[in-house]
Image: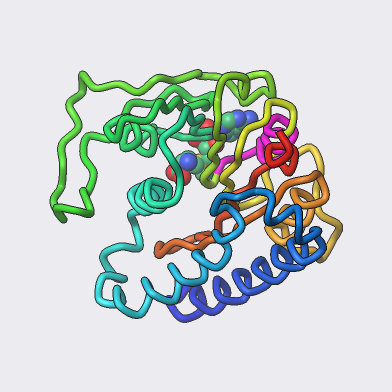
Amino acid sequence: MGKRKHKRESDQLYSQVLKIASQSLSSVNGDFLNYQGDSFVEEIDQSIELLSNSEPSRSQELPKMKKFRFQLLHRWMKKNIAPCRMADVGGGKGLLSYLFQNSGWKATVIDPVNQSLPPKYKDLSSNKQTVISPLEKVTRINAEFQPSFAQGFDLLVAMHAHGCNIQMIDAALKYDCDLILLPCCVIHEPILPPAGVQWIEWLLSYIIEKGFMVAPFRLNFKGQNVGMYARPFSRFLA
Ligand SMILES: C[S@@+](CC[C@H](N)C(=O)[O-])C[C@H]1O[C@@H](n2cnc3c(N)ncnc32)[C@H](O)[C@@H]1O
């Protein structure tokens, strides 16, 4: 897909996602929003700000940055979320977990395919290729995601994960976890959107109906780059 087409499609999806998420927030009682007392609600404004601040000023980085989705998600999460115990579901080789492990978070890959870490990655702060020793490891559960795996985690993250987005939503509700989803294609999900309905928009409505507050965000990489940061409403009442 050409750069312009990708940008246009991403813009359309992101604006739809923001609309759906803000409608859900406007239906929430104002006292309840005030009651939260933390910055979670402001994430939506922040995410718009991040987008408008980051994209034009980083336009020169775009050609370089489009490949670095793990580094960009790592940077966004570190900026917006306190260190916690995270499950990197469908985490593949485990680079995202590796970056978080090095940032002092407790990160575990859950993926049925056992894979080694990549031999190197680009460190965006130093702009240098960084070698990962073959002796380095991340904690892994080499299995398909099961809802019970969510127990003991604070945050479930799925970037482009297959077949587990719906299960993760149910698991986050049951085990009181936050969620970060950057879904891509619909593969092996137990329920599907009706014909003609866009998968990510449908998934967002599904999460909201299930009882989550959702803050959308978007990162500067090529491919499906719209994410949803979701927290069960019940957590605000606890
Ligand atoms: C498109 S890859 C994405 C990998 C990585 N997150 C990335 O962004 O490159 C999808 C991953 O989902 C994993 N996967 C497939 N079914 C899964 C399941 N039921 N539970 C957890 N992971 C699954 C695959 O093994 C694969 O590593």
- In the image, 170: left or right of 106? right
Q: Write the residue at 38% across / 74% down.
A: 53
- What is the count of numbered marks? 0
- In the image, 51: left or right of 231? left
- Image quarter where the C terminus lies is top right
Q: Main secondary structure of the magenta part?
A: helix
Percent coordinates x, y for residue 237 in the rendering:
73, 38
Query: Foreground: 116 or 83?
Result: 83
Query: Foreground: 217 or 95?
Result: 217
Q: Write the residue at 23% across / 44% down.
A: 121
Q: Based on the displayed image, in which of its 4 quarters is residue 173 positioned?
A: top right
Query: Foreground: 34 or 211?
Result: 34
Location of residue 148 with respect to 183 vertically, above or below: above
Query: Foreground: 18 or 43?
Result: 43
Location of residue 124 with respect to 188 vertically, above or below: below
In magenta segment, residue 54: no
Percent coordinates x, y for residue 172 in the rendering:
68, 33
- In the image, 71: left or right of 209? left
Which residue range is magenta in the image?
A: 161-172
Q: Based on the displayed image, in which of its 4 quarters is residue 164 positioned?
A: top right
Q: Write the residue at 51% across / 45% down.
A: 159
Percent coordinates x, y for residue 54 in the rendering:
36, 71
In magenta segment, residue 166: yes
Q: Write the residue at 44% across / 61% down.
A: 219
Location of residue 210 with respect to 138 vertically, above or below: below
Percent coordinates x, y for residue 160 in the rendering:
54, 47
